[in-house]
Image (tube, rainbow, N blue to C red):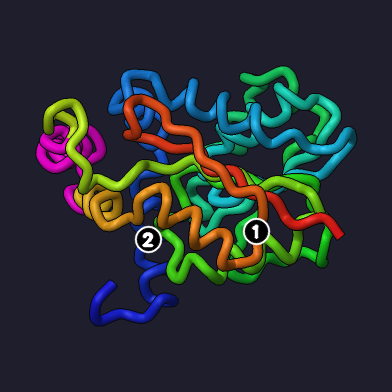
Amino acid sequence: MQGQTHQEHGKKVAAMFGRIAGWYDFLNHALSAGQDIYWRYRLVKLVRPAKNGLVLDLAAGTLDVSVELVKQYPDIKVLAMDFAFPMLACGKSKKLEGKYESTRGNQIAAVQADGKKLPLPDSCLDGATIAFGIRNILPREEAYKEILRTLKPGARFCILEFGSGRKRIWKGFYNFYLNRILPLLGKIVSGDSGAYTYLADTIRSFPDERTLGTELRNSGFDRVMFVPLLSGIVYIHVAEKPAD
């Protein structure tokens, strides 16, 4: 981030994800040994939107969370928003191929948008998710403010994100994997040497679970909690907009 504005950072990140969009799903599944599918399932379980509600999937990428939302809550509609249009395009083509039966009723609307300036009215959402995207938004507080503004009172904001890479996990094996193996495998498969080095760098610099919880509370959220997964490599954070 040093030497560049938040706007320049956002454009650079969007361009990077645009370059690897075609490999994104494969690499997510391969580099997590398929655990990312379970993590998204657990994330969506905690959203608990109102019946026939509207849920935002921010940083929706290739729509995996959006599809899981519709699977678990067949009566809702999902707004899938991402700053990187090529990611959404990959997800839309996956959906239109009929891979997921439950998405055929136009329940998912994919829209390119900035998470810090959501094109939505106040108090219109029955829930919101973001999976592996909040660490790419700077400053995070602007995204929190927008989510809080657009949620209905009592609705949940659920975050799926890596824990801080500064903690030693599995006697340091995870840290070695994160710093050395992951960038190398990402480069070999996608051909992009920077994308997965960036991933490791942002995980290392990301706040720990308690600090992230404090950020959410300071931004106005209530009933903040977190759930560790896979020895704390990943966390699900849940926060609610205070009820009026």
Task: Please tell me in which quadrant of the rendered image residue 63 appears.
Answer: top right
Residue ID for mark 2: 13
Q: Secondary structure at mark 2?
A: helix
Residue at position x 35%, y 66% from top?
A: 12
Task: Please tell me in which quadrant of the rendered image residue 65 appears.
Answer: top right
Distance from disc 1 to disc 2, alpha carbons, whole Å, reads 27 Å
The x, y position of residue 111, in whole percent, is: 66, 54
Magenta part of the chain:
175-195
Residue at position x 55%, y 46% from top?
A: 130
Q: Which mark is residue 177?
A: none
Residue at position x 27%, y 57% from top?
A: 205
- Camera-side residue: 211 or 161? 211
The x, y position of residue 55, in whole percent, is: 74, 44
User: Mark 2: which amino acid?
Assistant: Val
| Camera sees residue 60 | no
Q: Earlier in the sequence, mark 1 or mark 2?
A: 2
Q: How packed is label 1: few (under 14 Cα within 10 Å), some, or many (20 or more)?
A: many
The x, y position of residue 19, in whole percent, is: 35, 50
Residue ID for mark 1: 221
Task: Judge whether residue 179 is colored magenta.
Answer: yes
Q: Secondary structure at mark 1?
A: loop
Dominant SS in magenta: helix
Q: How packed is label 2: few (under 14 Cα within 10 Å), some, or many (20 or more)?
A: some
Q: Is residue 167 above or below residue 173?
A: below
Left or right of 13, for residue 184: left
Left or right of 98, for residue 200: left
Left or right of 164, for residue 236: right
